[in-house]
Image (spheres, rainbow, N blue to C red):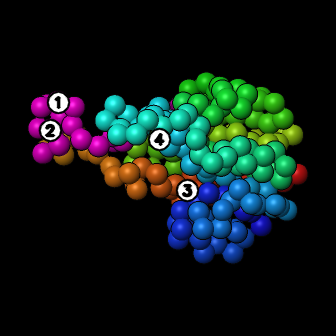
Amino acid sequence: MIAALYVATGGVYYGLPDVDPWDEARDARKYAGPWPVVAHPPCERWGRYWSGGPSAKVRRKLGDDNGCFEEALAAVNRWGGVLEHPEGSHAWKVFGLAIPPRRGGWIRSGQGWTCCVEQGHYGHRGRKATWLYVRSDGRPSELTWGPSEAKIRFDQGFHSTAERRASRTGACQRMSHKELAATPPAFRDVLLAIARECAL
């Protein structure tokens, strides 16, 4: 059994016989074992736009996620498994995790391993560079490293007249926040396989 923490209600981790999904209502901060985990803690206050961006009406505080990342990291270190966050997450520096190279490959980080991998290799329509932290004594399985073929931009809106024109022809596409945040089933399966490898 694998515990999937901080996942979307009814999302790709639901309906699997060997997965125990913890959505917001269950409050994954309370997870007390005993199974290894796949953790997707909220990233809004850790990413590049943690402050809410230039048009934000309220100034945000870096890392203000009610302790979700800290508890997710503790669960991975206690029970084994993998934690997923966007590439560039400020949480890596705050919690002393090694910054992985953008080109990919596992590197040592404390008691575990970390890497950068693009979800575009696993069915996401965007490249979606992602950092993983794995608590494992042995080196985790190799993934598909380097840039993926995905070309779709994540951000909404247009930054120039040329982009607006390109969108009318289909040359410039955007994706919704929901689609951006979603974990592709193939990537979910990779994360679950990693968690199964490194049960403590």
Tag 4 residue:
128
The outermost residue toward the front is: 58
Relative to 11, is 192 on the left or the right? right
Where does the image place residue 197, in percent across and percent down from the top left?
A: 79, 52
For the residue marked with disc 1, what is the amino acid? Ser
For the residue marked with disc 3, what is the amino acid? Ala
Within 10 Å of the Cα at label 3, are there few (<14), some (14-19), or many (20+) other Cα atoms? some
For residue 160, the mark is 1
For the residue marked with disc 4, what is the amino acid? Lys
Query: Going from the N terminus, do you reach mark 4 or mark 3 first?
Result: 4
For the residue marked with disc 2, what is the amino acid? Arg
Is 147 magenta? The answer is yes
Magenta extent: 145-168
Where does the image place residue 84, in percent across and percent down from the top left?
A: 62, 45
Report the Cα–Cα distance between label 3 and label 2: 32 Å
Tag 3 residue:
186
Q: Are marks 2 and 1 in contact (CB under 8 Å)?
A: yes
Report the Cα–Cα distance between label 1 and label 4: 23 Å
Within 10 Å of the Cα at label 4, are there few (<14), some (14-19), or many (20+) other Cα atoms? many
Q: Residue at x 53, y 35 (%)?
A: 61
For residue 164, the mark is 2
Query: Going from the N terminus, do you reach mark 3 or mark 1 first?
Result: 1
The reply to whether residue 87 is in sight is no
Within 10 Å of the Cα at label 1, are there few (<14), some (14-19), or many (20+) other Cα atoms? few
